[in-house]
Amino acid sequence: MLKIYNSLTRQKETFVPIEPGKVRMYVCGITVYDYCHIGHSRVFIVFDMVTRFLRYMGYEVTYIRNITDIDDKIIQRANENGEDFHALTERFIQAMHEDFDKLGVLRPDFEPKATDNIPAILRMIETLIEKDYAYQAENGDVYFAVNRFQQYGGLSGKKIEDLRAGERVEVDTHKRDPIDFVLWKKAKPDEPSWESAFGSGRPGWHIECSAMSTEMLGNHFDIHGGGQDLQFPHHENEIAQSECCTGERFVNYWMHNGFVRVNEEKMSKSLGNFFTIRDVLKEYRAEEIRFFILSSHYRSQLNYSDQQLDLARSGLIRLYSALLDIEPQVSAESEYQQRFDAAMQDDFNTADALAVLFDVARDLNRAKTEQSSDARLLAGILRKLAGILGLLEADAAEYLKSSVTNDGLSDAAIEQMIASRQQAKSDKNWTLADQIRNELTQAGIIIEDSADGTRWRR
């Protein structure tokens, strides 16, 4: 049974879909005004993994991931560039797709843009005003009245009294309460705007996701996901305005992935400590980035460094090396698959699931050495389980050829290492034997075991 850590209840819960056999999931995408960075890649890869596993379990998944294509940052960047904001956002939407296609991230079923959903946004704001959950201030902006929603703070654990005490009233004297948040911003000169019953303007950030998610998935759906940084205020505000508008529970399971950190700080554009996916892809393969992201549990904090990506590269080399020169055979359910499934059903624990892959690779290497008939079955198991995570989808020989480098080992050194590996195998020291094989592979040396002994080539 699948268990998901629900950020709302702060505990793991058995997943029970609203409609048997079907899952409706919404994930907050990005604001498209610049190239995507590695922090963005974690959100996209994590929920791609979630979608893949849910489908592997047999669920019919409807996956929505939005695009924010209007906000202050977009307007500012477009003005700086002297271009129309539509041209800016379309350019970076295309760049986003290019980046994540390379990372093996499947496209969502639908990818709504805020500017294409203005009518739905306006309908929600009008309903909130009619129900007295929102008001138009003297400055023309429309605000949500936070104190009208008694459950506010349930997701983040924050209390209205504490939030109010921490606000500076002078920031916006037009609000009835300093913690109220904007739903509709009155148009400013030379800014994009849309006509509405409350005057020309544009939507606030929070209302976009509430309108798009309920428009496409219904008032009440199964999973809402995003980065940990969105838990407050974005997702907190989504709950408030959505439930006040519809009178129904908004979402059953809230999922939040941890930050990608650099030197113990969250990677972000505002801090200037980010690495774009495009820059990282100049030094590392896309699959190495994906492996790096999945090597830790999605809720943990993930430290970015070249050393971590080097470890991801070594791990993939080890797995691909096991698949070299063998034709995988489709197999029935195995003990490895049961362990893999158990790890993934425990709140999508990819770290433990990857450990199962390495166990399969170890046993596959042993079977190849012993020329066991199990080798092809093990290769099939490895391919199948890795494929659920979007890994090991390349040809093993091609991957290794393009990923390893020759560090200048002499023929004599190679022969000595192979002799040491043979001795380790005789001693049944499989860990050392695998380690030597991996070192040779990373040095650009391919070894082939047969009944006649071990051959090697550069």
Image: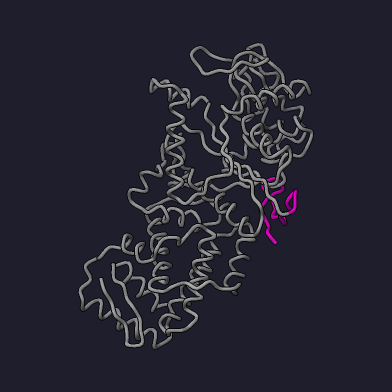
Q: Residue at x 42, y 70 (%)?
A: 323
Establish if 362 lies above or below 68.
below
Q: Position of residue 91 (x, y in %)?
A: 42, 32
From the viewer's perspective, tell me whether residue 21 is left or right of residue 303.
Answer: right
The stretch drawn in magenta includes residue 4: yes
Q: Position of residue 386 (x, y in %)?
A: 50, 63
Identify the colour scheme used. one colour
Magenta: main secondary structure equals loop
From the viewer's perspective, tell me whether residue 142 is left or right of residue 191.
Answer: right
Q: Which residues are magenta?
A: 1-20
Establish if 110 lies above or below 173.
below
Establish if 107 lies above or below 384.
above
The image quarter in which residue 352 lies: bottom right
Q: Residue at x 61, y 23 (%)?
A: 168
Q: Position of residue 113 (x, y in %)?
A: 56, 32
Nearer to us in this view, 349 or 247: 247
